[in-house]
Image: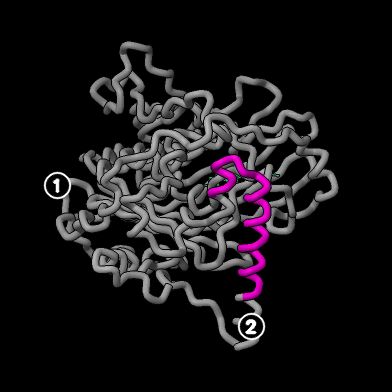
Amino acid sequence: YNEKAGTGETLEKSGLDLAPSFRGYEDGIRKRLKMDADDRPKISLWGILKSMIGKDMTKMTLPVSFNEPTSLLQRCAEDMEYADLLDIAASRQDSMERMVYVAAFAASEYASTIGRVAKPFNPLLGETFEYARPDKNYRFFIEQVSHHPPVGAAWAESPRWTYWGESAVKSKFYGKSFDINPLGTWFLRLRPDGSGKEELYTWKKVTSSVIGIITGSPTVDNYGPMEVKNWTTGEVCVIDFKARGWKASSAYQISGRVNDADGKPRYSIGGRWNKKIYARLTPGFEATPEEPKAGQQNHRGSVSDPTQAFLVWEANARPEGIPFNLTPFVVTLNDCNDKLKPWLPPTDTRLRPDQRAMEDGQYDLAATEKNRVEEKQRATRRRREDAGEEFEPKWFHKAQDPTTGEMYWQFNGKYWEEREKAASGEAWRNV
Ligand code: CLR
């Protein structure tokens, strides 16, 4: 394992063999939950929230029926749904085209927020979640490294890229809306095909907001500017997520451009974060690219015809009838099949009894179990405080990125090494 992957030194493409980490994932992805439909009690959000104006999410106690059976760790893993965009980016010869695909990746995670006005479970301190995809050749790992404020440190890797960042958010309930502001910077190290040179990209996530609370039709909107920077070339992509206004036509809209190192536009980007993103070569000027016509959809294309926009990303279908409005990708996350179980540490989200009960529709059990594990966490914290000890994350430590100067959580890589010992029953001795 090359710890330097995040610090600018070369991680050889061939040097990353993920095969050992794929053990346990032989059964493939889960296609459905145990339950066919959720019958959560329908309670008015406003009725319960109106006494909590001004509060942030960590200070709200809500009935478990406002939860969905995911954890915030898994909501971060949802970033991986369209990881193939990063592979496409790495395959492009032109850095501007790579930027178009990297920016599409950064914007692609919002499609899955639709229809999910529900609270993910708050991870326990030291809780972890791993997710590997042999079919897509990547692995993802995240650990809850702080409880107050809640922070998860994530690290995903594939031979052609490494993606990392932290989940910290600032949230506030304003009455009219409930806003969630992600705070951390996300880093991407891309190893383009056929060039020896790695690239470092960074960006911050936009604001997510629950609107329509008072009118009784709550929905999630995502809005604000997003700036994706390529620190290696100096190219920048700016994308504006339009806040949903009164006109339905502004819903989900994004528009943006890729600027070269001199600040001149080269590509224009447009579309909707819930459906499609397209781009067009517009050297020296900015335009609103027209959606490519059906049939002419040069899917995941490139600039074969500079007068035509090409499709960069398209959201996966949202089949109806998945409980809690989950996406098919989310259904794969909390799967704990018999093959995988022996490989998991006791800290993995999949083993949380409250979240599992919720997934199975046993809401009362979910509530009592949630109380129990949270009480246990409080007792552990008190014991730690009495002993004058501080919690130390197992798999991450703070480091400073030499290029951007920002602090980030550096993965120590030991998680996957430790996991390999599960074959001999030796793993997870002291987690
Ligand atoms: C958005 C994408 C980011 C990571 C992220 C962090 C916090 C998530 C947010 C995403 C989506 C919306 C979210 C939020 C936490 C709480 C909020 C799930 C995934 C929900 C909708 C708030 C529900 C409000 C209750 C009062 C019911 O990369």
| Residue 378 highlighted magenta (yes or no) | yes
Mark 1 near mark 2, Cβ–Cβ under 8 Å?
no
Q: Indicate which label's residue lies in the foreground, 1 or 2.
A: 2
Q: Is residue 21 above or below residue 271?
A: below
Residue 215 numbered tag = none
> Which quarter of the rendering shows the N terminus?
bottom left
The residue that label 2 is drawn on is 385
The image quadrant of residue 147 is bottom right
Give the image location of residue 322, x and y in percent: 52, 30
Q: Closest to the observer: 384 or 246?
A: 384
Where does residue 199 sit, x and y in percent of width and height? 29, 54
Where is residue 198 shown, x and y percent of the image?
A: 25, 55
> In terms of secondary structure, what is the magenta stretch mainly?
helix
**Label 2 sits on what residue type?**
Glu
Does 51 lie within the magenta span?
A: no
Identify the residue shown where x is 53% and y is 49%: 356
The quarter holding residue 45 reads top right
Can residue 38 be spotted in the picture?
A: yes
Residue 325 located left or right of residue 375:
left
Q: Nearer the viewer, residue 321 or 299?
A: 321
Residue 385's place in the image compared with 103, above or below, is below
User: Circle 1 sits on which residue?
Assistant: 194
Query: Element under label 1?
Result: loop
